[in-house]
Amino acid sequence: MRIAAIAPHPQLRPYVLSYRIVEDKSGEFAGMPIWTCPEPIGVLSANFGKRSYHESGEIHPKVGLLGVQTCVRQWISQPETLFVMAILTVPGMMTFFPDIGQESADNLLDVSDLWGAQKARKFWHCLPDEWRLDDIKSAMDGWLFSLLSAVPIFRRERRLQLYQAL
């Protein structure tokens, strides 16, 4: 399994910790549980290979959002698993997904249910066919900048202030 981390554009840092690519083309970890620990982050993911699945047996959505994790969870890789993630800060979750609140905590949501199928499909298709790190970074930065530009500046600043006050 290969995992690569990519830093987002510096202006996105209050909202995005990193981008990560997870690839298990050979199936080295297929069928084995992979544990994740509680973290105050959200994860926006786009799945391209054979989709991994949740410990419950449910297949992960093509474009998913995992909310803040308050407990240990596991997922299972499959042969040809390939996905990219944007690791979102709490202000990133509040800014990019303002209306979901508690619904996302410890849940993996299908982003097409949040954004609509067309917008989720556009996000998935914005990512390059060739998996070069610079191309993925550029595509992810571009998409998240477009989301950010749709949020009024005063609202972004207020969400950052609220988070810093916690």
Image (cartoon, rainbow, N blue to C red):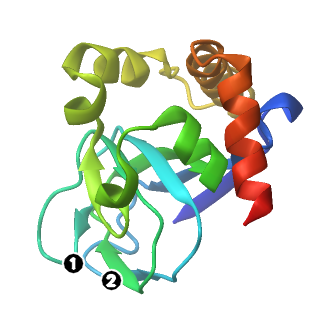
- Name the residue: 34% across, 80% down: 74
Report the residue at 58% width, 60% height from top: 2
Is residue 114 rendered to the left or right of residue 88?
left
The reply to whether callout 2 and callout 1 are in contact (CB within 8 Å) is: yes
Three-letter amino acid code at the position of disc 2: Pro
The foreground one among 33 and 153 is: 153
The nearer-to-camera label among 2 and 1 is: 1
Q: Badge 1 is on which residue?
A: 55
The amino acid type of the residue labelled 1 equals: Glu
Q: Nearer the viewer, residue 118 or 76?
A: 118
Residue 58's image quarter? bottom left
Q: Earlier in the sequence, mark 2 or mark 1?
A: 2
- The C terminus: image quadrant: bottom right
Determine the secondary structure under disc 2.
Answer: strand
Residue 31 falls left or right of residue 1:
left
Q: Residues within 10 Å of mark 1 (few under 14, many from 20)?
A: some
Identify the residue at horizontal 27%, vertical 33% (top origin).
Answer: 114
